[in-house]
Amino acid sequence: MNPIKVLYVEDELFLGKIVRESLESRGFEVIMEGDGAKVTELFKKIKPDICVLDVMLPNKDGFTIADEIRELDEEVPIIFLTAKTQTEDVVKGFTSGGNDYIRKPFSMEELIVRIQNLLRNKTEAPQKINGGIATMGKFSFQLNRQLLTIGKEERKLSFRESELLKLLYENRDKIIDRRDILNLLWGNDSFFNSRNLDVYITKLRSYLKEDPSLEIITIKGVGYRFVVV
């Protein structure tokens, strides 16, 4: 089996060396480039499995590079590395074709989990709720009616609760990035919305606790995984 090929674009040589060696020690094949102007041609040549792009680069920024890559390949996962914290920069990253972003400084474990998660999501299509009704353990979830039923007990969900449960169910047994949830359901990952997400996760856990085969697991620093045994 061929190793996963990572196109890693970073102009900070010391950081780049650490990240490259760490990824290579985990079995990844890493092709590193520090000049933004050279990345698109390099992408055409090596055809990587995933791209990890710093945003601030000499000659061409990461957002522009992502736009160019997307014209060549609509499917390859792209992760941005950024020191920027403004919401508009995060939104720009997603509109440029990015799948994920990590703020510097970051841990190698976080980067590796995000790489693995994106590659898994690429190969595994979401399991859609057919006919508006899903069976999860002992529960029946009627999406159109926003109704969660177990036995004779019915619980009417709010719109946001229903959409969150739908997202978790359709991506069950996969790690869902917390920021993806926030951007999909709330439109941005502000602190206020992040706290709201915590509240909704707690509510769903309380609703589902009657069936121990269902669990919403927190993956610290990354997101959630909905397990249906």
Image (spheres, helix red, strand yellow):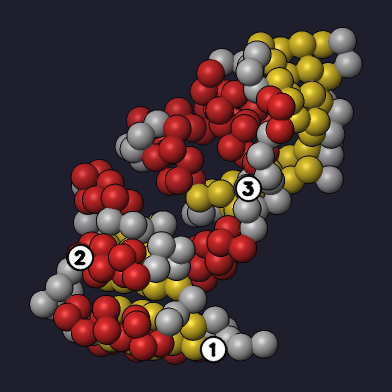
Q: Is residue 7 above or below residue 72?
A: below
SS of the residue under disc 1: helix
Image quadrant where one finds the N terminus:
bottom right
> Looking at the image, how many numbered discs can be counted on the residues?
3
Across and down, in percent, residue 94 comes to 33, 51
Mark 1 / mark 3, whichever is N-terminal: 1
Comparing labels 1 and 2, the label whose residue is closer to the camera: 2
- Determine the CA span between mark 1 and mark 2: 30 Å
Q: Is residue 59 above or below residue 110?
A: below
- Determine the CA span between mark 3 and mark 2: 29 Å
Residue drawn at 17 percent across, 69 percent down: 61
Comparing labels 1 and 3, the label whose residue is closer to the camera: 3
Q: Residue furthest front?
A: 72
Across and down, in percent, residue 6 comes to 44, 80
Name the residue type under label 1: Ser
Residue drawn at 77 percent across, 11 percent down: 154
Q: Which residue is mark 2?
A: 64
Q: Nearer the viewer, residue 120 or 223?
A: 120
Across and down, in percent, residue 214 comes to 78, 38
Q: Is residue 13 left or right of residue 115?
A: left
Q: Is residue 101 left or right of residue 27?
A: left
Q: Which residue is mark 3?
A: 126
Q: Can residue 208 be seen here?
A: no
Name the residue type under label 2: Thr
Q: Can residue 70 be seen here?
A: yes
Q: Nearer the viewer, residue 139 or 75?
A: 75
Q: Nearer the viewer, residue 167 or 122?
A: 122
Q: Which residue is mark 1?
A: 25
Residue drawn at 24 percent across, 50 percent down: 92
Residue drawn at 21 percent across, 45 percent down: 88
